[in-house]
Amino acid sequence: MSLFGRSSRRDLHSLAAPYALDALEPHERMRFEKHLKKCDRCTTEVRALSEDAVRLAWSTAAQAPPAMRDRVLAAVRTMPQEAPSRSAAPARPHHLPAHVWGTEPPPPPRRAPRMRSLLAPLATATAAAALVVASLFAVQATRTQDQLEAERDRSREIANILSAPDARATSERDAQGRGIGVVASVKEGRAIVTLSGLDDPPSGSVHQLWLMRPDAQPHSLGLFQGDTPLVTGGMNGDATSLAVTVEPDGGSAQPTSQPITQLALKSVGFGE
Amino acid sequence: MRMPYTRGWPCGPAGAEGERVEADELLVRVARGDQNAFEELYGLVSGPVFGLVRRVVRDPAQSEEVAQEVLLELWRSAARFDPGRGSALSWILTLAHRRAVDRVRSARAATEREQREGMRAHHPAFDQVAEEVEAGLEREWVRHCLDRLTNLQRQSVTLAYYDGYTYREVAEQLSLPLGTVKTRMRDGLTRMRECLGGAA
């Protein structure tokens, strides 16, 4: 950078402490990070100063809101992870760049898909699960405009449910590992419902979700498409449980078979 | 009241190598998609992350929102963590701090004038450390060590780290030249390091 002379380079060195404290403006931050790539001494210094700065954080610990835990843990069940890759490594936009922490090459891919939990089918579902968090994380993918808009609507809906003050999560699995997970808000009357451990329905049939209420017929909440979480309204406050049945394509007005899995809703605030 | 998740946070002289290693291992497992590990990691870091974000952002609702984003980002981006390059706790809190600062700055940009007036009446951030929810011995150590700094070192460090001001804004507030603020920040951090007990 010929624009900046020697004195400017000295200036750059002096930015190590403000950088470690996140006290640079964006353009300075970028310029300094560029400089770091060429300056081993700065890298060492920034690393030490950053550790110092972080120690200031330890004195501020506070009790996180319990509802936040439910929301985060529920969201994680449906949220895809970034795959570690060499091409992704230089992009680290949000935290100290790789070279700040040392000179080692990027780590080898660590992903071991088979080790994922029983809810893995949801977490690995492609566009469907990705759109669950698209609004939060702007997951990029190649889709048509219509699809994008539909997903945006859906993402907004999901974000609304996740951020409802009374949003709660629960899940249940039977001995065969089949189960339902739900994030629901009584106030909004809405829920995000996920299935786990279920075989694909036989060809020509679908998984249909039902809301069970006392003294009332089961009420259809919708049809599952593959592993995609179902976003649904119509969650009456007096609902007692959710049930899933296998129904002919297009769904049924009333269940025509026994539920293959069920979930009580009391722990998420319904039926009271 | 002492929070379980602040137990042994490595601020005091004794350090807490065990927990640091625990967080490192958990984050590596999280990167493999281990949801149980994430739940454990959540227990370990949600308090520090939320507390730090709230310290910087102040507004409770916004703090919760930012803290939630940070924690979800941990899940999503865990694969970026390389234990060879630093501790997981540092990585996590650095991320949380960056996010909190970004939020508070964009909020400030919206109400810059108001904020500027607020600043004048604003006492050094350090004073407010005392109002924070109990963080036990760790808080006392940080406080003790902040006390050991000169006024300008302390103000330079805390206005930046706890209040999210840029060093230019800090210079303006303290009526100091930019170079002086940068030096005070560096000296302040270095003295904190010595006081808190050396290598993190």
Image: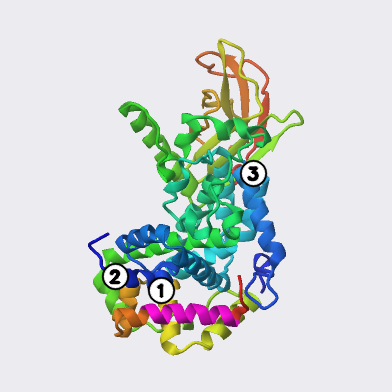
Q: Quadrant of residue A238?
A: top right
Q: Quadrant of residue A206?
A: top right
Q: Residue A247 or A79: which is nearer the viewer?
A: A79
Disc 2 marks a residue whose amino acid type is Arg
Looking at the image, is B71 positioned above or below residue A220?
below
Could you say which disc has been placed on residue B35 in the image? 3
Circle nearer the viewer, 3 or 2: 2
Other residues around mark 2 within 10 Å, as few (<14) / some (14–19) / many (≥20): few
**Span colored in magenta:** B182-195
Q: Residue B107 or A245: which is nearer the viewer?
A: B107
Is most of the magenta stretch helix, strand or loop?
helix
The number of callouts visible is: 3
Do callouts 2 and 1 point to residues on the same chain? Answer: no
For the rendered model, the colour scheme is: rainbow
Give the residue pinned by disc 1: B160
Asked if the residue at tag 2 contacts the one at tag 3, i.e. Cβ–Cβ closer than 8 Å, the answer is no
Q: Is residue B192 rendered to the left or right of residue A6?
A: right
Residue at far top of view? A204
Q: Residue A209 or A124: which is nearer the viewer?
A: A124
**Is B184 within the magenta?**
yes
Query: Which mark is first along the chain, 1 or 3?
Result: 3
SS category of the residue bearing label 1: helix
Q: Quadrant of the C terminus of chain B?
A: bottom right
Could you say which disc has been placed on residue A6 in the image? 2
Q: Quadrant of the N terminus of chain B?
A: bottom right
Residue A39: image location, x then y, percent = 42, 63
